[in-house]
Amino acid sequence: MSAQQTRSPKPRRRKAFGALCAGVVATATVLGVCTPATAAPATNPPAADQTTALAGANDWSCKPTAAHPRPVVLVHGTWADMTTTWSTLSPQLAERGYCVFALNYGTFDGVLNGNLLDLAGGADIASSARQLADFVNRVLRSTGAKQVDLVGHSQGGVVARQYLRFNGGTDHFDPRRNRVHTLVTLGATNHGSTFGLFSLLNDVAHKVGLPLSGAVSAAAGPAYIEQLVGSPFLAALNAGGDTERGVDYTVIATRDDKISTPPERTFLAAGPGATVHNVWVQDGCPGDTADHGQLTTDARSLYLVQSALDPAYGRTHPAPCG
């Protein structure tokens, strides 16, 4: 074989790498990534951002009332943030008298951990769950409440479940001491997602020796890869059952979800001592076309959230449709 023949595959390899980079950008675009800030080196895991303005949230002087005794903590998803995710729900809950809190988690945590683009919700999920644990502890101290309720969108639901199981959100010996009473998830990747196009791109990438999953992890953090169907992370999280004793779960899904796919993989099975309500936004409203991102703004979806947080709300307010 000639030297020219030996070198000939290189342009094809460069083209393949360029295609993979384009795939990373396309994948990020599908999930609604905003232009990131320039990443700065970090030697310790960053604390959750508690300062970004979000209407209705993070009033640290707020004290729970008898009508709403538990603060509500809102947990965004992958490559998102609290402001873009919760700008509808947060003021709604605050207007109804809830103490509402939200955080930005999972940003840049050093070059060895990926997420060079410094995208919120990009860090490994175990690290993000520890940030959530610290945040919830601060909420409990500030408000004097014994428990909180959590609402998680997409990865936020998985971060919340990781916190419940491994980071002190529940007491495995005495559920009466749980820090969390209710978890509501919206399009959560509880049992993994194929993420549509990504699975195909990744299969092609492996065939040419350039795994797209590695490129995504380096650029935007490992959380995305950890949410793929069959990931070791999800196998560990779901081992032994989906739920924790003493927690009420409401799992909300949309049949038009193109991100958490197939959408029925979000649903949970109730284990001992837990209650689970799996619901489609299309139940009773087949014309609802909310997609993955719209679960945080769709009127029927947010009605289901408020009804899960306060069952009296569902009994006294009509369910919107259309």
Image: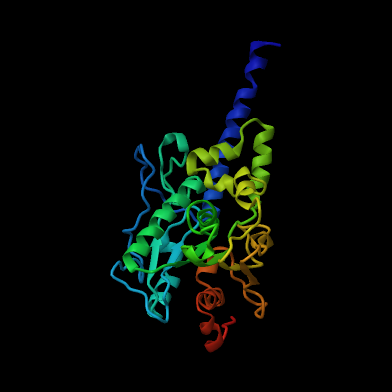
Judge whether 12 appears above or below 86 on screen.
above
Q: Residue 171: percent from the left, percent from the top?
A: 51, 58
Please state the horizontal and vertical placement of residue 210, each as a whole percent of the image. Answer: 61, 32
In the figure, residue 39 lies in which quadrant? top left
Q: Is residue 234 above or below residue 73?
A: above
Give the x, y percent position of residue 223.
53, 47
In the displayed image of the protein, which residue is found farthest to the left?
Answer: 61
Q: Residue at x 40, y 48 (%)?
A: 36
Q: Does 59 appear above or below 48?
A: below
**Of 6 and 233, which appears nearest the observer?**
233
Q: Quadrant of the N terminus?
A: top right
Which residue shows up at 43% across the image and 40% down it? Answer: 116
- One can see residue 142 in this view: yes
Residue 195: tell me if it is visible: no
Quadrant hosting residue 6: top right
Q: Residue furthest right?
A: 1
* Residue occupying image coordinates x 52% and y 84%: 312
Colour scheme in the image? rainbow
